[in-house]
Image: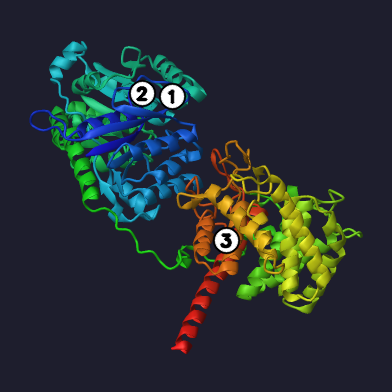
Amino acid sequence: MKLAYIGTYPPRECGIGTFTQNLTQSMLGLDKNGVQQNEVLVVAMDDNHQQYVYPPEVKLSIRQDQQTDYLEAANFINLSGSDICILEHEFGIYGGLSGVYILPFLHRLNIPIIVTLHTILDSPSYNEKAILKEICKMADKIVVMSQKAILFLTNIYNVSQEKIILIEHGVPDIHFDKQKSKKEFKLNKKKLLLTFGFIGRNKGIETVIKALPEIIKKHPQVLYIVIGKTHPNVLRHNGEEYRNYLQLLIKNLHLKSHVLLLNEFIDENELFKYLSACDIYITPYLNEAQITSGTLSYAMGAGCAVVSTPYWHAAELLTEERGRLFDFNNSTELAKTLNQLFDHPGTMKKIQANAYEYGKNIIWPKIGKKYIHLANSLLAFPKQKLEKKETVIDLMLLPPFSLTHIKRLTDDTGIIQHAKFGIPNLKEGYCLDDNARALLMVSMTYKQKKDFNALELMPIYLSYIHYMQNKDGSFRNFLSFNRNFLDKVGSEDSFGRTIWALGYLIGNAPNDAYYQTGKLVFFDAVPYFKELKSIRSIANTIIGISYYLQTNPGDDGMTEILKNLTYKLIDHYDNNHSNDWKWFESLLAYDNGILPLALLHSAQIVHDPKIIKIGMETMDFLTEHTLKDGSLSVIGNKKWYVKDGERSFFAQQPIDAMAMVLMFHQAFLLTGQKEYLNKLFTSFMWFLGENDLRMSLYDFETKGCCDGFENYGINRNQGAESSLAYLISHLTVLQAYEEFYQSNDANTSEKDRAL
């Protein structure tokens, strides 16, 4: 069996790195002759531009903040012949916001995945929870090290218990004679208290130091040794502030001869000598939120008497007379507990013996066998492929349709264009773009669902559009919150989107008042149609005119305008396309799907084979560059994708995903081919986590949609554009699903009649 591991790795000084190395060595599967049965390779995580000289088993390293390194690593593992990938997960070692870069890596792996979780938070942030849930979804098995961790995963993260397995934190099978170790360190006349690990304020070392004066009164030979460097993150942000504080505390309490702070990261052999020499091991952490403690496991493995605050792992591990607990930040209780143990050596020896018995069962050779057994079980029962459905549209995956966030963003003027997280940002005011999208969305909602909330919102958005129209028929775009105009004439893009919304309204108005108002504003704007230069404005206007003509097919003048705009768009294609670049411009920029969509709409009315040919060609070209590996990868707005250049992956935005959904829907309506429904639903699932970051942009709490994602992770602001893009896409999925099954029913009825 060939095993691939990803995590930190020595010589990087990190507890996860030590764990990964020990796990790797324990899974070599040595036979009686010392010949290894399994092959291992390691992908190591670098940090903050540090470079390490790794041992031979490390075949590749990933720079923490370079997302492309993660994708290359996934390809490397897929091509390496590895059977299983084992990932060590800890917040802080992977790049992006809350370590989001690990998600695309896991998504691209083609082999079973075992994830070991070293930290599970009971009160995670939105991103931490979303990322861990996605990791658990992609993992075939999840290893945790405590019962508490299982409860957290099932209750907080909704992970199936069948996926979770408890395997304790391993400890090295290293033992030294207590008296010899004390003699070697010249501590044979001392009562040794010990704490080790990276140092930071959450370790609570001051609690022990403050307890020492009371202990020394009865046991003056006590020495407290703290072994460990300051945690790299603490050092980076606060320097040695905490260590200096401890030194000052030691000085003020006159404890220089009773406390030794060793600023070292020592190897395991040296560490176990100290553990063997110590009388009592202390973990005085300041809060309960620690689901796993490697230092605690090591102390148990060495047979130490452990005294600890009741953080989660300690409260679980130190039952059955394997240690003693004292309350957080309670030096008085700690002093009392330590004095009792020193006063009753028989009790202390019993605790040490119980700890040693427990430790014998968690030595790395035994833990490694458990992981090997887990890996073999995954390979013995590979996942069965699901039967392919007629169409991949699965309505059970859709959240309930909700206008909650849109109502939150809307006041009696219109829809606020931006939000801070899920809260309207009134400082940014309103824009025509979003009120036009909002009008389109509520018109679709009322048509499909007869939702009276949509009907109540419709006049607000239509009124805003009417208010922003100038006397000459053009439109302003921006309006401040106190209703001051912020421009004289808006962008061509905002003009085109408005015509689209008005055209749809005219064809689907719920009553005559809305129809007449929409028609009035629409026709007042007609003189500007021929002036349009922006191809996206042209495309949006084509779509609006097409909707109008569906219910007014006898308007020959408007049909002629549609033809002229359509051929303008085709001229752009003729001037820019080549054999390997079938597009309207020399780059793929924003809202790309709108351009083929416009031609596919026009093709329903203007019966020219060239229109549909170019519409399908450009749709296929866009699909080729964005719909890969079973999910949508929108062209990023950060740098876009210039011909013969490299495409941008960052600043992906919901309007681009919406355009793809609408484009494939129109292709289905034209051709009847269900492959376009599959592509439509794949594009829609971009909103729900089937994207490059593997994170949902839809917020199930606010019912809004996040504004896209950057290189650091999700942009949690939930403005109108993004939330409307999601809702329009959601409605399109529902419509397409109904159309597909209606057409199937119709075909079935036709066959029945024929029989």
Q: Nearer the viewer, mark 2 or mark 1?
A: 2
Q: CA distance from mark 1 to mark 3?
A: 50 Å
Q: Nearer the viewer, mark 2 or mark 3?
A: 3
Front residue of this view, candidates 460 and 191? 460
Front residue of this view, candidates 489 and 417? 489
Which amino acid, mark 3? Phe
At x 46% / y 25%, what residue is drawn?
234
Mark 1 lies on residue = 232
At x 36% / y 19%, what residue is drawn?
53
The answer to whether the residue labelled 2 contacts the one labelled 1, judged by CB atoms less than 8 Å apart, is: yes
Mark 3 lies on residue = 664
Q: Is residue 727 above or below residue 711?
A: below
Q: CA distance from mark 2 to mark 3?
A: 51 Å
Q: Of the numbered discs in the image, which one, if any, rests on residue 13?
A: 2
The kind of secondary structure element at disc 3 is helix
Instruction: Report x, y in % for residue 363.
Output: 18, 33
At x 50% / y 45%, what residue is drawn?
692
Circle 3 crowding by C-alpha within 10 Å: few under 14, some 14–19, many from 20: many
The kind of secondary structure element at disc 1 is helix
Mark found first going from the N terminus, 2 or 3: 2
Q: How many marks?
A: 3
Q: Is residue 227 above or below residue 5?
A: above
Q: Quadrant of residue 347?
A: top left
Which color scheme did the rendering employ for the protein?
Answer: rainbow
Q: CA distance from mark 2 to mark 1?
A: 9 Å
Image quarter (top left, top right, bottom left or bottom right) of the N terminus: top left
Q: Is residue 392 visible?
A: yes
Which amino acid, mark 2? Glu
Residue 176 left/right relative to 705: left
Q: Is residue 744 above or below residue 641?
A: below
Q: Quadrant of residue 699?
A: bottom right
Residue 438 left/right relative to 249: right
